[in-house]
Every structure is written in structure tokens, then in C-alpha cells.
Amino acid sequence: MSGVVVLQPGRERSVLNRHPWIFAGAIARVDGDPRDGAAVDVHASDGAWLARGTWSGHSQIRVRLWSWDPAEAIDAELIARRVRRALAGRRALLDDPQTTAYRLIFSEADSLPGVIADRYGDWIVVQLSTVGAALRAQALVEALVDQLQPRGIYERSDAEMRAREGLERVDRLLWGTLPDGPIEILEHGQRLLVDLTGGHKTGAYLDQRENRRRVAAYCRGAEVLSCFSYTGGFEIAAAVAGAARILAIDSSPEALAMAAENLRRNVITTPVEHVAGNVFNELRRLRAEGRSFDVIILDPPKFVHNRAQIERASRGYKDINLLAMQLLRPGGILATFSCSGLLSADLFQKIVWGAAVDAQRDVQILERLTQAPDHPVLLTFPESEYLKGLICRVW
């Protein structure tokens, strides 16, 4: 072991409760000189052994905990065991021929801190957001190849967290080959193109897979407005469910072009209009034109990247929800989401409540939504719950 981290008196409670983060302020001293990413033991102030993790001297989260077993080393065997366990928990997805894209490993929630791995058909895309994960990339690749035999494993470690770990952005092929261009995956039998090297996140928003079905259930016969469309996942689900017509808005013409191709691949006959523009501006334009809709979907990108942005982001969420409520016909459905982990579910509901008051509309919550089950929430790590959604009826 390259070092021992000794905690301040009284700061061992979170470790005993199996929370996987230790912040700089909880540390009394470090015995030894651990390099970034090295394994360290964590001791209470009285010297009692507590847990084992990896050290990150650049981050406010100094230690990411991997094990509470003193006999368990942070090595390739541990990573292989954790990968097998993660895959076992996703056996239904692995055996489903109608869905070929899903999350395989969800970082701390799967006891592999800093490791994201998503499957897209025959390829796997990984994100390694911590130095401890980055130094163990080879062991991760070997475990994934052994279990899944993919055609290729590609790393897209571009999350902002890497900067806080003293790491640079990485885009590289880790194993095998890359596809020549976008590939086609299935989501509940629906065909979707995914750009593994240039799309958002690891290529697609896999966390919304089940929510697309839930929202689509309200779209039969409806005129639908889908905001922040990206490549059209919500629109395809709505059209398959029987939507009468759809207007989709996104700031990226390239994403909308892929959305149009996705509609074609699914032989969608529902009229779908694509508008490239700023959603905030387009919602105001639609309001000025006197437009109205039966269903409005708000699936914005992450507005909050640090705590200093919460107030500004809250205004943004309130703005789009207020505009949506003003555009809904009486009895219409608002499906509204936030993927900002730093914005709590309670605060998000208060923001939507504030929009309802300002819009002078009666709004009922019909369903509360969260991320798909392949993005599990670890009870001892509530930070793993980040996606919040409300399906509301607006009178």
C-alpha cells in the first residue's frame, strides 16, 4: 500500500455508512506519499482500518473508495469481479434482442468509481472520469472483452470531472476496431442511429430509454412539441404510439438531420416538422404566434455543472416550463426533465410549481420519472440519482 489516509476525529461516519467519497476537509493527515491513482488505506483517527480506495491529489474528492474488505486488493481481479456483477444485474437487457444499447457499468453505483461503460450493439464506449479509473483502463478492457467479446472498445473521457482530477480529455480506441460511421442500434425494437465518436455523452441518452415509452403513452392522437430533440428518440416513440403530428426543436442541424434519418428508418408516417433553433427563443415565437399543443416534452441538456450555477439554472428551468405551460391546451400533458445531479428532485418540483403559479395554470403531477434501471441508484450513494422527470397534466 502506497499510503495511509487518516481522517479527522468524527469524520469516519460516512465511510462506515459506505459512502464512496472522502473530501479533502475530512482528512487529518496522509502517511506516505501516494501518487495519483494509487491505492490507499483509510483509517479512523484512532487508527482503526475503515476502507480502501484510490488517491487523487488534484481533486476535492481526495479518495474514491473501492472496498470495505481489508483482504481485497484494488487489482485486475477485483475489476473483473465487479464487471461480472454489473453484467449479472443487467442480464435481462443482455438477453433482449429488441434493445441493443444500454449502460453496462455505472461508476460508483456499480462499485467501480469513475467508470462508465455503455454498450452499443457490437461496440462499447467507456468514460474514465477519475485518475484511479484511468490507471486501470487495461484491466477494465480485459474484463469487458472476456465477458462480452465486442468488436471494439472506444474511450470518450471528456467529462468535466476529468479536469478536476488533473486529467486531460481523451478520445481513443482502446481495443479492436471502430465502425466506419454511425451505427444502428435498437431501443424496444425502434431503430436509432448513434455516432459513437461524435454524439452527445457516450453517443446517446440511454438513461431516457424507459421514459420515452412512458411519455409516448400520452401521445396517441396528440399534437406534440418535443424540445431539445437531439436525434429524435422521444419523437419516434410518440409517433409509434399514434401521435397526430409532431414539432421537434433542437439547436443542432446535424442532430436534426440524424433525427430525420431515424424517422425514415422506422417508416414513420406521422407528420414531423424539425426546427433548428434556440429552444427558449422558439418557445417565445410559438407563443407569439398563438400556437398550442396537447403534449410538450422538455428534455434539456445539463444546466448545472457546479453549485455556483444552481440559481441561474433554476431560472432557466422555470423559464422553459412556464413557456411550455402557456403553450399547452387545457388538459394537456407536460413531460419535463432535469439531468442536473446538483439540482435536487425537491428543488426541481419547486421550480415547476413556481412556473405553474406564474402561468396561472392548475398543474397535477401524474408520474415521477427517473433514470432507466441500467443506471441504478446505490442507496449509500444518493448522488447516483441524477435524472428527474415529471409527467404533469396542465389545466
Image (spheres, rainbow, N blue to C red):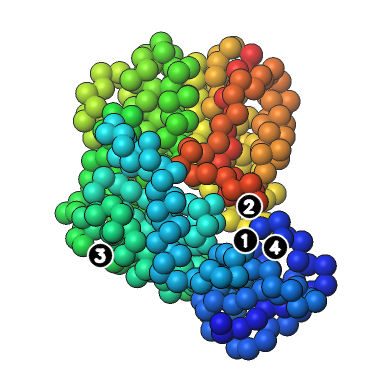
Query: Looking at the image, can residue 260 be seen?
Result: no
At label 2, the amino acid type is Phe
Q: Is residue 268 left or right of residue 319?
A: left
Front-most of residues 137 and 177: 137
The residue indicated by pointer 4 is 15
Q: Is residue 386 left or right of residue 147?
A: right
Q: Position of residue 272 (x, y in %)?
A: 32, 24
Q: Is residue 138 left or right of residue 183?
A: right
* Residue found 43% across the figure and 74% down from its top: 135
Query: Which numbered dot is residue 381?
Result: 2
The residue indicated by pointer 3 is 175
Front-most of residues 24 and 42: 42
Marks 4,2: beta carbons within 8 A: no
At label 4, the amino acid type is Val
Give the Cα separation between the discs numbered 4 and 2.
11 Å
Marks 1,2: beta carbons within 8 A: yes
- Which quadrant would the C terminus be assigned to in this image? top right
Image: 389 above or below 255: above
> If you read the primary sequence from the N terminus, does the residue marked by circle 4 or circle 2 appear first?
4
* Quadrant assignment, res 328: top right
The residue indicated by pointer 1 is 20
Give the Cα separation between the discs numbered 1 and 2.
7 Å
> If you read the primary sequence from the N terminus, does the residue marked by circle 1 or circle 4 appear first?
4
Q: Position of residue 179 (x, y in %)?
A: 19, 54
Give the Cα separation between the discs numbered 3 and 1.
29 Å
Image: 287 above or below 133: above
- Badge nearest the viewer, 3 or 4: 4
Query: SS for tag 3?
Result: strand
Query: SS for tag 2?
Result: loop
* Residue found 69% across the figure and 73% down from its top: 49
